[in-house]
Amino acid sequence: MKHTILWGMAVALALTLLTANTEKAFDYKLSPKKVSTNLWCFFGAIEKPTKENAGNMVNTCYVKTKDGYLVLDTGPSYQYALQAYNVMSKIEKLPVKYVINTHEHDDHWLGNNFYKKEFNATLIGPESINSEYQEGVPTRMHAILPKSAIKDTHIVKLDKTINKRFSLELGGEKFDIIPIEIKAHTDNDIIVYMPERKILFAGDLVMNGRITSGRDGSVMGQIKALEMMEKLAWDIMIPGHGFIVDKTAMDESKLYFKLLKSRVLEAIENDVEATEINEVVILKEFKDKAMYEILNPRNVSSAFDELEMLE
């Protein structure tokens, strides 16, 4: 009897382990939108990452060339990247030659290891991804996403880090990779410009339909970065989050940071204290935008700390 019970327990344990190892992957239900000739993007929800959306709140894009794909940002997990490629392979099954990450926030690059593993793609991005993250140390996405989404996700080093502007060509398409070189959304923001097609990939320097997160950024740097992008000749702009990609894509960001700067400076001139700043600077023009209640108070407080130091 004792042996029978032990045998039953062993079988149950084996079945549990087998089930855990064969757990069905989270279904991101990805559907690309054709934005322009040879350009498809997956547009994520304008909300925070949750177990329910598994980090599908970021914009990632594929540029198809004669020699393969170039991918802009790879999403929050290996499973996301795998599923994105599977969908794109139905459009045309091509290898991914290059991946470019626009900044260090992990919802934009944790899919890198899929492209490295499957295609040995050249991974390009900011140095901070290599210096601030390492395999075995969980990131924000590891803490938030369900196991069925984050499984198989590993941190791999970039092949090339960017500290000055350079260009690459792939299959007849030219890409200018441009570091911002000042603290803006982060310390290491990169934009990607296709001058012949007048397409600009702005990363999280531009968001629309939702409030930006300024936790690692600078109001003054954001304004300078937006001014820099405004000088480029573009007809299509892909934001890091949001759905607007036409000539109005950056209008919300420009207005938000302009008002944030001017109103916080006015409050400082009127001797408003840090503890009172969110009662005075409301930015009600953006109260109907996604993430307003969560992120706007933080942004106002961070702007106060930054701009107070300029006085």
Image (cartoon, rainbow, N blue to C red):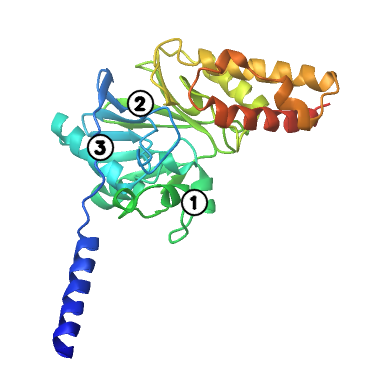
**Does residue 116 show up?**
yes
Q: Which residue is labeled 3 in the image?
A: 84
Which residue position is annotated with label 2? 174
Report the quarter where the N terminus lies: bottom left
- Who is closer to the viewer here, 54 or 133? 54
Toward which corner of the image does residue 53 lie, by quadrant? top left
Which quadrant of the figure contains the C terminus? top right
- The amino acid beneath tag 2 is Lys
Q: Secondary structure at mark 2?
A: strand
70 or 149: nearer the viewer: 149
- Identify the mark nearer the N-term, 3 or 1: 3
Q: Is 71 placed above or below 154 here? A: above
Q: Is residue 13 above or below residue 59?
A: below
Contact (Cβ within 8 Å) of mark 3 with mark 2: no
**Mark 3–mark 1 distance (CA, rounded to whole Å):** 24 Å
Name which residue lies at 49% across and 41% down: 105
- Of labels 3 and 2, the one closer to you: 3
Which dot marks residue 130?
1
- From where the camera sits, is residue 180 visible? no
Instruction: Bin the neighbour count of mark 3 within 10 Å (Cα to Cα): few under 14, some 14-19, many 20 and up.
Output: many
